[in-house]
Amino acid sequence: MKKLIIKRQTSFLLFLLLVLAVLCTGEADTSISPMEKTEQEALYSAIQGFVGNWWNGSDLYPDPCGWTPIQGVSCDLFDGFWYVTGLNIGPVHENSLRCIQNVEFRQHLFGFKNIKTLSFFNCFISPHRHPMNIPTQNWEKLAGSLEFLEFRSNPGLIGQIPTSFGDLRKLQSLVLLENGLSGELPVNIGSLINLRRLVLAGNQFTGRIPENLDGLTQLLIFDSSRNSLSGPLPLTFGGLTSLLKLDLSNNLLEGELPREIGNLRNLTILDLRNNRFSGELTQSLQEMTSLEEMALSNNSMGGDLMKIEWNSLQSLVILDLSNMGLKGEIPESMGELKRLRFLGLSNNNFSGNLSPKLAALPYISALYLNGNNLTGELKFSEWFYGKMGRRFGAWSNPNLCYPVQLMSTGHVPFGVKPCQKDVTIFNSD
Ligand SMILES: *[C@@H]1O[C@H](CO)[C@@H](O)[C@H](O)[C@H]1NC(C)=O
Ligand SMILES: *[C@@H]1O[C@H](CO)[C@@H](O)[C@H](O)[C@H]1NC(C)=O
Ligand SMILES: *[C@@H]1O[C@H](CO)[C@@H](O)[C@H](O)[C@H]1NC(C)=O
Ligand SMILES: *[C@@H]1O[C@H](CO)[C@@H](O)[C@H](O)[C@H]1NC(C)=O
Ligand SMILES: *[C@@H]1O[C@H](CO)[C@@H](O)[C@H](O)[C@H]1NC(C)=O
C-alpha cells in the first residue's frame, strides 16, 4: 500500500487504470507487494556500478519491481516480498542499461538472495584503457540460487575464470563467450553437475581440457571453440552421454580421437575442425547415430575411410573431412547418406574412381573433391553439373576427366579436362 500512497499525486486517472488492471489480472496482492529496503538499495547500487553515478535509481525507478520496472531487471515474489531474480546489463534493447567505461563490480551484486540470472553483454569493452577481471570472491553467496551466468562480447574482461565459480552448484548455464579471458580452465568446473550449457568460445584459454568433466551428466552443449586449448581430448568425454553439441574447433588439441567418443549417441554436432588431432579415425564414430554435422577438417589424421560404416550415420547433413591427409578410396557407403547436403573431401589423397551414387544424393548441394588423386571418367550427369556449378569441386585431380560428349552442352565440371580418346588416363604423364 505504501507505493500507492507515494504515487497518490501523480494522477487519479492512472490510479483508476491501475486498479482496473489489477482487478482484471487478479494480481491485486502481488502488484503492490513490498520490497526489502536492503534488496532495493543493493539493486540501485549494483546497477550504478556499471552505468555510472549519474544514474539515480531511487529517483528514476522508485518501484523497480512494480510500477517503474527497469529494463533488464526481473523480479519475483517470495513470501510476499519482491526480490531481484534477473539482472541483465548491456545494450540488448533500445532502453537497456549501458555500461560506462569505468565499470565496477560492487559487493551489492552478491547480495541478491534469489537471483537466478546474471548477464553482462558488451559491458567491459576497453581491454587497454580499462581492463577488468571477474571478481574472484563472493560467488559462493549466489550458490543457492544462480542458474544462468553469462559474460558475452566483453573484450575488456580479462584474466582467468575464478575458481570460486565451482561453488555455483545450481548453475545450469555458464556462458563466457567472446571475452578477453585467458589462463587454464579451472578443474572445479567439473563440480557444476547441473550444467546443461557450457560455452567458453572465443577467448584465449590455454592448457588442457580438464579430465573431470564427466561428472557433468546433464550437459547438452559444450562449446570451447576459438581458444588455444592443447593436449588430448580426455577419454572421460565418453561419459558426457547427454551431449547434443560438442564444438572444440579452432584450438591446438592433439592426439587421437578416443574410441569412447562413440558413446555420445545423442550428439548432433561434432566440430573438431582446425586442431592438431592425429591418428586414424576411430571406427566408433559410426555409433554416433544422431550426428547431423561432423566436421573434422584441417587435422592431419591420415589413414582411410574404409573401416567406418558410413551408412549407419543416416542423420548426417554436413560431413566435412577436408584436408586431413586421408587416402584410399571414397567409400561407396557415403552415397547412402540420404540427408547429406554438404560433403567436403577436398585436399586429401583420395584415389580410385568415384561412385555415381554420390551425385544421386537427393539433397546434395555442395560436393568438394578437389585436390585429390581421383582417377578415371566422371560419370555424373550434365544436369548435375548445371545444378551444382562451382559447388561441385573436382579440380586438381590430374587424372580425372569427363566424357568428351558433354562439351557441347556447356555443363561441364569446373577445372576438369575432357577425357581424350585413345589415351589411357593412367599413363597420361
Ligand atoms: C537520488 O535522488 C534522491 C532524491 O532526488 C536523493 O535524495 C538521493 O541522494 C539521490 N541519490 C544518489 C545516490 O544520488
Ligand atoms: C538421448 O535422447 C533420448 C531422446 O531424446 C532421450 O530419451 C535420452 O534420455 C537421451 N540420452 C541421454 C543419455 O541423455
Ligand atoms: C586450416 O588451417 C590453417 C592453419 O591452421 C588455416 O590457415 C586455414 O585457414 C584452415 N582452413 C580452414 C578451411 O579452416
Ligand atoms: C598419396 O598416396 C600415395 C600412395 O598411395 C603416396 O605415394 C603419396 O606420397 C601420397 N601423397 C601425399 C601428398 O600424401
Ligand atoms: C596418384 O595415383 C597414381 C595411381 O593411380 C599414382 O601412380 C600416383 O603416384 C598418385 N599421385 C600422387 C601425387 O599421390
Image: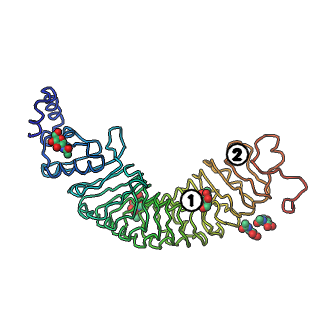
Q: Nearer the viewer, mark 2 or mark 1?
A: 1
Residue 187, percent from left and from top: 38, 71
Residue 146, percent from left and from top: 27, 58
In depth, the one of 306 and 225 nearer the eye is 225
Q: Badge 2, how many Cα within 10 Å: few under 14, some, many 20+?
A: some
Element under label 2? helix
**What is the quadrant of the C terminus in the image?**
bottom right
Element under label 1? strand
User: Hey, what amino acid is under mark 1?
Assistant: Ala
Q: Residue at x 50, y 69 (%)?
A: 261
Q: Is residue 40 above or below residue 306?
A: above
Q: Is residue 43 above or below residue 350?
A: above
Residue 235, percent from left and from top: 47, 73
> What residue is shown with label 2?
384
Report whether residue 343 is seen.
yes
Distance, label 2 to label 1, CA atoms, is 25 Å
